[in-house]
Amino acid sequence: MSATYLHGARHRRRLVIVVRADPVICGHSGEARNLAEAAMQRGFTEVRVVTWTLERLARSGLPLKPLESVEPYGPGIVVERPEPVGDYRVPDGRHLAGVVGRLVELFTDGVPTVCMSLYLSPHQTAVSEALRVARSTGRPVRVTTVAEAVGSDITHVVRTAVAEDRLGAAAHVLASYLDADLPVAVSRYTRDLIVEAAAEVDARFGTRFAAACRARVEVSYPAIDTAAYVHADPAAQEQVLSRRGLVRDGYVFFLSRLVHAKGVDDLVTGFAASPLCRDLRLVIAGNGPERDHLHALAARSPAAARVELLHDVPDVEKPALMAGCAAFVLPTKPRPEFVETFGIALAEKMLAGGGPVVTTDTGGVGEAVGPHATFVPPGDPAAIAVALDEVLALPPAERATRAAAARAYAMQFDRVAVLDALLERIPDEETGRVVFA
């Protein structure tokens, strides 16, 4: 697809993104925002983010940002939260029905549309059903679909379905995924995971999903607003640190969801055991189901007086907190319910600059950081302590050299570049799908 063509186009062009959007704390809600902003830069005349009502999100148990901390989307981007359809006699599916119904309306108004779903369950399910219904209306449908899968689509749904001998559930996810004109995965690791899981379904039930996944699924790394990190105002960053009572290079930093798989417990223990951290603070930023447990763990730590948990960090503060830290540690570890399929926070940290990154070579993390991190084994607090002592002892010149190389590597995840690469891969055969170039 030609970006020049899009910039010069006079006709309407729409991008629809179906996702768990803000205020959900999730890297892919941020990715949706970045793709939306990039689409406006690339000449789309409108972008619609179709997501869930605030009331449903509040009841879901998902970690949420404070509403007042959520930044507005740019001009031309509309966030839609369709109301549920039906009443108490519809015990489930009311909200999904609302999303499907709104998508049908968008798909049948004649505007050429690219529709992208982030997460397969239930977002690609909604897209597939809406497209089926839209085509049944007899109205003109000019829609191309992109489905992006993350690891939890496989670990939470497909493999659970296989373990529980539920063909229908596994087939539903994989068939909906392959319904898309362009099925993509957030990393090579995730793509391999999808093919392996499809092969498990085939072996168990005699289906034929693996070959189709192997042939059709491509990799599209998450889209990041690199400018927010690379071109941040140093004076504004110092103000953020001052408001938080922090000083540059005076703290070790963690930022992600507070779940067991992120390894925060290992970090607290490793930090307390590190001699070179004795004069530093540990700042843990995030929210999630492990929040109360981690507060209790931190209170029992020998370094309790130097450990602080922040649950109110807005996106605009992230670049400053990342750039100001002495080291950034995300010791993620594989769990049955979650494996890090990329590591958006790690790439953001490398863009921000600041101290070195310490992490684990788990899942797709290696693709996010390349050779620009210090790796420790998962679930090993002692190794975290050693790694912290190693990176904190680096001379300033070497720290600066490493930071520059890390930033250069992470620039490949710029949101405009990621969107352009996606659009160039959209099929353009004469099949009624959208043709942009």
Image (spheres, grey):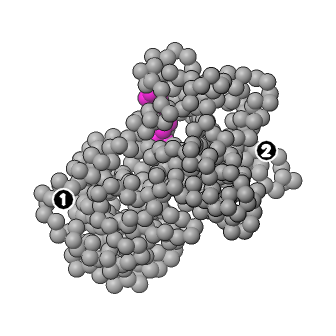
Which residue is drawn at the image coordinates 74% and 41% (left, top)? 129
Q: Is residue 328 above or below residue 217?
A: below
Which residue is drawn at the image coordinates 38% and 41% (left, top)? 414
Task: Report x, y in % for residue 292.
Answer: 51, 74
Q: Relative to residue 194, is residue 248 drawn left or right?
A: left
Provide the residue designation for mark 2: 85
For label 1, the crowd category at 10 Å Cα-Cα, with few meaning under 14, some 14 to 19 and many 20 or more, is some
Q: Relative to residue 159, is residue 232 drawn left or right?
A: left
Q: Which mark is residue 399?
A: 1
Q: What is the CA distance from the residue labelled 2 to the residue labelled 1?
A: 55 Å
Which residue is drawn at the image coordinates 45% and 16% (left, top)? 8
Residue 220 in the magenta stretch? The answer is no
Q: Are marks 2 and 1 in contact (CB under 8 Å)?
A: no
Q: Is residue 173 above or below residue 203?
A: above
Task: Report x, y in % for residue 275.
Answer: 22, 80
User: Which contiguous range is marked in magenta?
Assistant: 33-42
Which residue is drawn at the image coordinates 26% and 76% (left, top)? 386
For label 2, the crowd category at 10 Å Cα-Cα, with few meaning under 14, some 14 to 19 and many 20 or more, is some
378 and 86: which is toward the camera: 378
The quarter of the displayed image where residue 432 is located: top right
48 and 218: which is toward the camera: 218
